[in-house]
Image: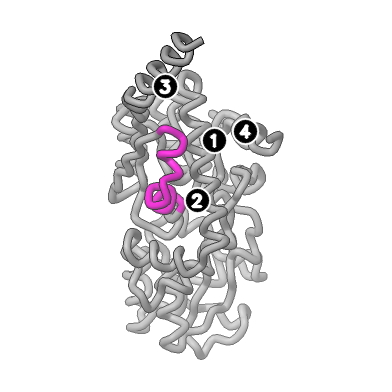
Amino acid sequence: MKSITGALIFLGISFANLPAPAQERIRVGLTSLAPTTLPVWVAKRQGFFKDENLFVEPVVFTSGTINSQAALAGEIDVALGSGTEVFTIRLAGEDARFFFGISNFMPFKLYVNPAIKTPKELKGKKLAVSRFGAQSDFLTRHAISKLGLDPSKDVTILQIGSTPARYAALKSGSVDGTIMWFPVTLIAANEGYRMLADLNDIITDWPYLGYYAMARVLNTQRDKVMRYLKAHVKALEWLRANPKGGVKVLIDDVKIAPAYAEAGYKEFMKSFAFDGRIPVAGFELLMESESNKLKGKFKVTDFLDQSFHKQFTKN
């Protein structure tokens, strides 16, 4: 009996001294440093990735194009970005899938000169987009049509550039309105410009951002990806329970100016998809915005892997 007890004690000491299993590494590409990346930074800060035996390395890029190129080259395992990045990869002849919804809302709002009070008063006015054929162009035309006007006849659409550039054009008076997103929308409201339409009321279920990856990664590393998603959802639950903590992460990690951080938390927290749902109808509209490239080549199921959402729903 003594020898068995001694052996058990020895085994216990031996196992206690064994090193912990090496954490599996995941490189996650981020299209930009935006409030939608909040769960990534929270999961790192709170140890949720570590709990899933993962070492997660976020890589912040300067555009969705570079993010998709990194995924295509195998430089990252998972990407946090938009469906249009998946379109880019598929058009290059490779298979990538949008597999977990993160933020399902339309972030754009139509801001106009304060003298314009109704959609009808947009007739004959000039609106700014980034460039013709871009998503901002499609969404502006879509919104104008839903407001009862003909975008090809009733307004003049001008190519101006980024959201800050379009807002500068609105302030200078060279255009009468443009669609913009946070935090420029908050600045515009504070400076007296009128929000004529919230595009989230027009397009109620939009796949703003989500996770995507090459199909080969999803097929061969499914368990690792699922553990990553578990940590992501834990981070969302933590964010919901800790608003002040979420605001602090926005300031410290996402580098949002303190003056806008609380508004940013409120704006994006309501959009997060806790179960990873991907709005299919919204994704089809996103495809329509790129119809000149995609028409006749793909159907919506060619871009999606719904099995991760289904597994979370089942669990």
- Compute the Cα span from label 4 to label 1: 6 Å
Report x, y in % for residue 129.
Answer: 42, 64
Task: Indicate whether 150 appears above or below 32.
Answer: below
Residue at 39% over, 67% down: 248
| Comparing labels 3 and 1, the label whose residue is closer to the camera | 3
Look at the image and say whether residue 187 sits in the magenta stretch: no
| Comparing labels 1 and 2, the label whose residue is closer to the camera | 2
Magenta residues, start to end: 39-53
The residue that disc 3 covers is: 12
Crowding around mark 2 (Cα neighbors within 10 Å: few <14, some 14 to 19, many 20+) is many
Q: Secondary structure at mark 2?
A: helix
Task: Indicate whether 312 appears above or below 64.
Answer: above
- The answer to whether marks 2 and 3 mark residues whose Cβ atoms lie closer than 8 Å is no
Q: Choose top left, top right, bottom left or bottom right for residue 237.
A: bottom right
Of marks 1 and 2, which one's residue comes earlier in the chain? 1
Amino acid marked by disc 2: Ala
The residue that disc 4 covers is: 306
Of marks 3 and 1, which one's residue comes earlier in the chain? 3
Task: Indicate whether 112 appears above or below 240.
Answer: below
- Compute the Cα span from label 1 to label 2: 18 Å
The residue that disc 2 covers is: 235
